[in-house]
Image: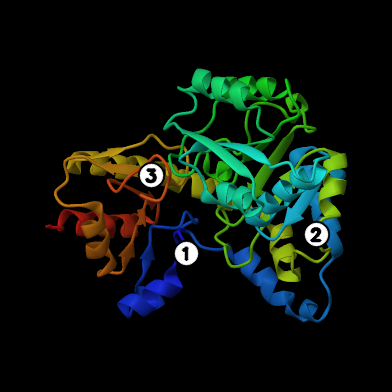
Amino acid sequence: MNSHGGQVWRWQREFNLNPKEIIDFSANINPLGPPKEIINQLSSQLDALQHYPEPYGISLKQIIAEHHGVLPEQVIVGNGASELIDLIILHRLVKSDNINEHLTALIPEPNFSEYKRGVQALRGKVNSFTTLSLNNDLSYMKTKMMEMRPQLLFLSSPNNPTGELINNYTLKNIVQSMEQWDGELILDYSFLPFVKSSWPKASLEEINFDQTFLLFSLTKMFALPGLRLGYGITSQEKIWQLEKLRNQWAVNSLAQTAFKECFSLQNYENKTRKLIHSERERLRAELEFLGFSTFKSSANFLLIKNNNFPGTVKNLWHHLACKGIFIRLCENFQGLDESYFRIAIRLPEENDRFLEELSSFTP
């Protein structure tokens, strides 16, 4: 069963809604929509669909490498970040000398569910613990790491769904701990472009890419979930091994076209960050006033807990859904319950509409 947000196709059927009537707060996508530069570029490249896409996105790797200051041989492009999550898990399993050995992974929860799904799909063993702030629970995190010595450790920064950005001190401690055994850190930076600083302060030179895989998504910032845009940075040796496990045309021609345009849209990114920061803090204040608790977020979404607001979150979800407004229930996130929900930060007028309907709700 699909447990993610953004199920517009389903809501159209169940609530008999026109797509234009739906305001989707459940998917963490840039409310500004796809940049016109990308749309125009895609329109001009439709004739390229009669040809196979460039194998492995070779020219795209060069653009990404220049953007991050790494070698093209350290970059892999994927059909969304989700494809690369599955690929890195498969790589770790294939890497094992013992074919009967079960893959082990440690995942602090709540977190993006695709990590756990990917490991369990290959019969791996997932260990987890609950923390709503990895920065505050670093000591406990290190204890769990030393106890388990996992082959894979999955972290997201900012975290989905809390929005917490892992600070440099926490990250450095985790990386140093991983060096004590042959473990691998998968650090998911899918929502990092929404942070004021679009790149972590820690320099890439400090990262041991033999044990670290940095994961990026362009789907969220550039509002292109239908095209599936993701990439990863790691060691040259690992990239070579990963590429052997997949087909060479995994990323289609239109996605590669959009990919290349993304890295030249700084004005769009700056406008987005300014909007997200302003609206996120405004929403936090309004929600706190209404009796909700909100988590301090660095991302383009807010995790919210119902403390004193009347009625249940499920009843609230149905009330909003009937108005064409959809929020993300969070009870299927490990460590959260039915009192939590998440909203994406949207345009001011859409956020106003959400607050208006929220205020009018009576259980």
Residue at 34% over, 76% down:
14
Give the farthest residue toward the left: 362
Whether residue 264 is visible? no
Please name the amino acid that badge 1 sits on.
Met
Q: Position of residue 27 (x, y in %)?
A: 45, 57
Query: For numbered disc 3, what is the local secondary structure?
Result: strand
With respect to residue 348, does 68 lie above or below?
above
**Number of marks in picture:** 3
Residue at 32% over, 45% down:
337
- Which of marks 2 and 1 precedes in the sequence? 1
Q: CA distance from mark 2 to mark 3?
A: 36 Å
Q: In front of the other: label 3 or label 1?
A: 1
> Callout 2 environment at 10 Å: few (<14), some (14 to 19), or many (20+)?
few
Q: Which residue is mark 3?
A: 302
- Return the residue nearer the eye: 297 or 248: 248
Please name the amino acid that badge 2 sits on.
Arg
Give the farthest residue toward the front: 100
Query: For numbered disc 1, what is the local secondary structure?
Result: loop
Q: Which residue is mark 2?
A: 246
Question: How was this image coloured?
Answer: rainbow
The disc label shown at residue 1, or none: 1
Query: For numbered disc 2, what is the local secondary structure?
Result: loop
With respect to residue 109, does 38 lie above or below?
below
Q: Quadrant of residue 104?
A: top right
Q: CA distance from mark 1 to mark 2?
A: 26 Å
Residue at 15% over, 58% down:
360
With respect to residue 40, does 315 lie above or below?
above
